[in-house]
Image (cartoon, grey):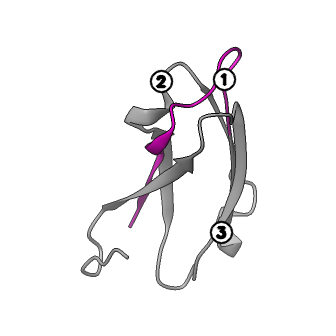
Amino acid sequence: NSSWFENQVGTLSVTLASKGNEAAVGFSLQFDPTRLQYLSASKGIGAGSATLNINNAQAQAGKVGFVVGLSSGTFAAGSNEIVKVAFK
């Protein structure tokens, strides 16, 4: 859970609870576009050398898709911050 004041920029961390055998993960975030504006996204500290692909074509409608994938190996077992998303 995160909360921000009106017109304040805030960052939401997306965390993967990894078993240690995942090489990629895809997910979508859905939000109320009358209350939040998607600004940007970046890899989290737990993403390591992974590639982050973002589909923000529907951001104005309140939907953003993400794929985080490693070219080799797997995410470490445990809690890994894989994406940081900035909203206003």
Q: From the image, state whether disc 2 or disc 3 is nearer to you.
A: 2
| Badge 1 element | loop
How far across and how far down the image is residue 81, in percent?
A: 43, 45
Which residue range is magenta in the image? 68-88
**Residue type marked 1:** Leu
- On whether residue 57 falls in the magenta region, the answer is no
Q: Which residue is drawn at 34% across and 74% down?
A: 2
Q: Disc 3, disc 1: CB below 8 Å?
A: no
**Residue type marked 3:** Gln
How far across and how far down the image is residue 18, in percent?
A: 57, 45
Judging depth in this view, the residue of 38 and 20 nearest the camera is 20
How far across and how far down the image is residue 46, in percent?
A: 43, 34
Residue tagged 1: 70
**Residue type marked 2:** Gly
Q: Which residue is drawn at 71% across and 16% down?
A: 71
Q: What is the residue that sits farthest to the top in this orientation?
A: 72
In the image, is 36 to the left or to the right of 27?
A: left
All told, the count of numbered labels is 3
First in sequence: mark 1 or mark 2?
A: 2
In the image, is 85 to the left or to the right of 7?
A: right
Residue tagged 3: 60
Q: Which residue is drawn at 29% across and 81% down?
A: 6
Mark 2: few/some/many CA within 10 Å (<14, 14-19, 20+) = some
Q: Disc 1, disc 2: CB below 8 Å?
A: yes
Residue tagged 2: 48
Mark 1: few/some/many CA within 10 Å (<14, 14-19, 20+) = some
Q: Quadrant of the N terminus?
A: bottom left
